[in-house]
Image (cartoon, rainbow, N blue to C red):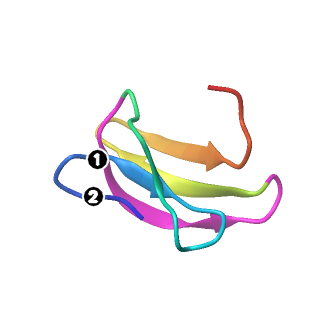
Amino acid sequence: MIDKQSGVIHVSKDMERFTALEPEERVTGVVGLLPEPTSVLVIGEDQLYAVKQDCAP
């Protein structure tokens, strides 16, 4: 889930508890899911980004 005003991404493994991730660039929307590697393609203010599952901070 992405808060469009702040650009903060909320993630959850069980859809009950969510953790906020604060990206370096503001996220303005979601394009869709990518199967390999498991990730979400999101729209940033300057380009597209892939948010990957279990990536290092």
Read off the residue under disc 2.
3
Can you say which quadrant of the picture contains the N terminus? bottom left
In terms of depth relative to the viewer, which is nearer, 54 or 40? 54
Query: Image quarter for residue 3?
Result: bottom left
Element at label 1 = loop
How busy is the neighbourhood of tag 1: few (under 14 within 10 Å), some, or many (20 plus)?
many
Residue found 56% across the figure and 74% down from its top: 15
Q: Is residue 6 above or below residue 31?
A: above
Q: Residue furthest bottom?
A: 15
Q: Position of residue 24 (x, y in %)?
A: 38, 27
Q: Position of residue 44 (x, y in %)?
A: 36, 43
Instruction: Left or right? Give the position of 44 relative to 54.
Output: left
In terms of depth relative to the viewer, which is nearer, 57 or 26? 57
For marks 1 and 2, give the CA distance: 5 Å
Read off the residue under disc 1.
7
Residue found 48% across the figure and 65% down from its top: 31
Q: Position of residue 14 (x, y in %)?
A: 64, 71
Residue found 52% across the figure and 43% down from its top: 49
Q: Is residue 27 magenta?
A: yes
* Dominant SS type (magenta): strand
Check contact, mark 1 vs mark 2: CB within 8 A.
Answer: yes
Instruction: Left or right? Give the position of 41 relative to 1.
Output: right
Q: Which residues are magenta?
A: 25-37
Query: What is the three-letter code of the residue carrying label 1?
Result: Gly
Query: What is the three-letter code of the residue carrying label 2?
Result: Asp
Q: Is residue 25 above or below residue 53?
A: above
Element at label 2 = loop
How busy is the neighbourhood of tag 2: few (under 14 within 10 Å), some, or many (20 plus)?
some
